[in-house]
Image: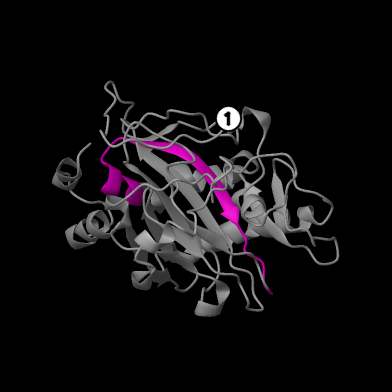
Amino acid sequence: MKQQQVLSFPPKVLTQDQRAFYFENGYLLLEKFISDEWMDRLWSVTDGFIEESRSYTRSDSKFDLEPTHSAEAPRLRRLTQPVEHHPLYWEFVSQGPVVDLAEDLLGPNVKFHHSKLNFKWSGGGEEVKWHQDIQFYPHTNYNVLAIGVYMSDVTDEMGPMGVVPGSHNGELFNQYNDKDQWVGAIDEKDLGRVPLDKAVYLKGPAGSVTVHNCRTVHGSLPNNSAHSRPLFLQSYSAADAITITPHPSYSRYNGEIVRGKPARWAEFDPRPCQLPPDWSKGYSSIFALQQEEDDGRVAAAE
C-alpha cells in the first residue's frame, strides 16, 4: 500500500503530522506510549526469564548470552521470539496498543513478522553497529517496520538506539564483508555515504516506543551505565509485503495477520534488496557476529 493510501485512512493513535513525520524521516519516538499497567505485566514475565537464564551456560535458540554470562552475574543479550515463550508477549504484540500504531503506518491490513527482547546489559552491554534491517529478511516491498518498547528509562549513557533521519529513502547498503561473509553491518568504507552527523538518539522514560522503517540506518552504542536497557522489539509488515526468505528464528506466529485481512495481491517495490545467507544452517545473533564470536552459526537481525 502506497504512502498516500495509508494516509487516507483515519489514524487510530497518531496524528496526521506524526504519520507524515514517519514517512519523511523513517522513524518515530513516542514517549510513555505504553501504559504502566502493560509495563507491569510485561516485567512480571520478563523477570522470570532473566532468572531462568542463570541456569544457561551457552547461547541457544531461546537465550543469547554474552560470553561472560554466569549464574551469579547474568548477562543476557536477547530472549529470541518471546511470543513463543509466554502468551503475554503474544497478547501484547497481537492485541496491544502497538498494533494500532502499526496500522496507522502500514494501513488497515497488518502482518506480524517476528519479535525479540534485547537487554543491552549494564556495564558495557554491547554496541550494535550501523545497519539496516530489510537485508536480513527481504520482502516484496518496504512497508515493513519495527516497534520497540523501552522497558526501563533510557538515558544517553545507556546506549539508546540511534537513527539517521531520511536514510530509509536513500541507499540500501551491502552488509557482507570483503570476503563475502555476512556481517550484518554497513562496512566502514561505506559509512562515509551515511550522514551520521545527523543521527538522532532515541531516549525516553519507560514505556516509550521507537518506530523505524526497515530501510532506516540505525545502531546503538555500548551501555556504560549501571542499569540494563531492555528493548522489546516487534516487527510488522503490510499484508501485501510478502517475505522472500524465511525468518531463521521459528515462531508459530510468523506471518500471522494481526489486523484486517490477508492480501490477495502482492505489491512489488522496483528497488532491489540484498539477500541474506542461507539461514537453514543455523544462526547466532547480530551481537555475536558483530563482536566476531565465531560459533559456526550466522546472524539474525537486531
Judged left or right of residue 224, residue 265 is left
Can you identify the residue that label 1 sits on?
A: 278
Of residue 56 and residue 51, the one placed in the foreground of this image is 56
Q: Quadrant of the N terminus?
A: top left
Q: Quadrant of residue 34?
A: bottom left
Q: Quadrant of residue 282?
A: top right
Of residue 44 and residue 140, the one placed in the foreground of this image is 140
* Extreme-top residue of the structure: 264
Q: Percent from the top left, x then y, of residue 38?
A: 50, 59
Q: Residues within 10 Å of mark 1 (few under 14, many from 20)?
A: few
**Does any portion of residue 108 appear in the rendered image?**
yes
Badge 1 element: loop
Residue at point 37% right, 39% down? 237
Q: Percent from the top left, x then y, of residue 106?
A: 29, 43
Q: Which residues are magenta?
A: 100-123
Q: Percent from the top left, x then y, of residue 75?
A: 74, 62
